[in-house]
Image (cartoon, rainbow, N blue to C red):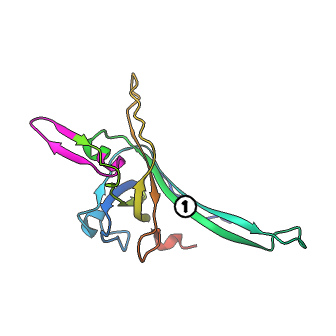
């Protein structure tokens, strides 16, 4: 007798996408992201895939007459998506620094970061390697520090990113689409 569903085990780094706020979201697992909207752009290679974090903070409600809390009150929650972009490009620098300007010249491209207050929020998307899972993060701002290490040998320079999720107007923080076989 099987103890679980081996078809529900998720493997691989998947594929990351980025889009401007308000971009239409995928409604299924089969329509390519770029067909849902041309605004969905693949982020390319990452160093070690991506990580989604979600946490809830709480406080216990205590009374003098009980040893145990009589209730638990939720006080905040936070979500984030982190990854390290492995492609050193002006576009990825712009994404990691929440905007800025890219100017193409003769044989060169320059990037300058945005001024404080000019940061741009984005949407993020993720799709599993097997195409049976999609995540849409509706509003995100890159808040992680930027530290680019240059080392000898095959150790590549990467652009670290940690996008914190913000509550979008009239929507939840994120949406997950699963294949129906993963309903249980």
* Relative height, residue 143 to residue 39 (above, below): above
Which span of residues is magenta-colored?
A: 94-110
- Is residue 3 visible in the rendered image? The answer is no
Would residue 95 be counted in the magenta stretch?
yes
In this view, the residue in front, 26 or 53, is 53
Residue 54's spot in the image, x, y percent?
56, 60
Image quarter where the C terminus lies is bottom right
Outermost left residue: 106
Circle 1 packing at 10 Å, graded few (<14), some (14-19), many (20+), is some
Q: Residue at x 40, y 25 (%)?
A: 151
- Is residue 38 visible in the rendered image? The answer is yes
Image-quadrant location for residue 17: bottom left
Residue 183's spot in the image, x, y percent?
54, 73
Outermost front residue: 116
Residue on which disc 1 sits: 78
Residue 108's spot in the image, x, y percent?
15, 36
Outermost top residue: 152
Q: Residue at x 38, y 37 (%)?
A: 158
* Relative height, residue 148 to residue 91 (above, below): above
Image quarter where the N terminus lies is bottom right
């Amino acid at each position: 007798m099987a103890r679980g569903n081996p078809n529900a085990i998720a493997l691989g780094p998947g594929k990351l996408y980025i889009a401007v706020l308000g971009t239409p979201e995928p409604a299924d697992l089969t329509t390519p992201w770029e067909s849902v909207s041309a605004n969905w752009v693949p982020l390319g290679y990452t160093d070690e895939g991506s990580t989604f974090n979600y946490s809830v903070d709480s406080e216990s409600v205590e009374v003098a007459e009980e040893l145990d809390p009589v209730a638990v009150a939720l006080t905040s929650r936070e979500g984030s998506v982190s990854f390290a972009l492995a492609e050193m490009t002006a576009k990825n620098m712009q994404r990691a620094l929440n905007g800025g300007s890219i100017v193409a010249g003769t044989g060169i491209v320059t990037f300058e970061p945005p001024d404080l207050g000019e940061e741009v929020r984005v949407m993020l998307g993720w799709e599993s390697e097997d195409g049976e899972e999609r995540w849409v993060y509706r509003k995100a701002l890159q808040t992680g520090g930027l530290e680019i290490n240059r080392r000898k040998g095959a150790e590549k320079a990467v652009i670290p990113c940690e996008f914190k999720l913000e509550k979008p107007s009239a929507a939840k923080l994120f949406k997950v689409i699963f294949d129906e076989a993963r309903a249980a």
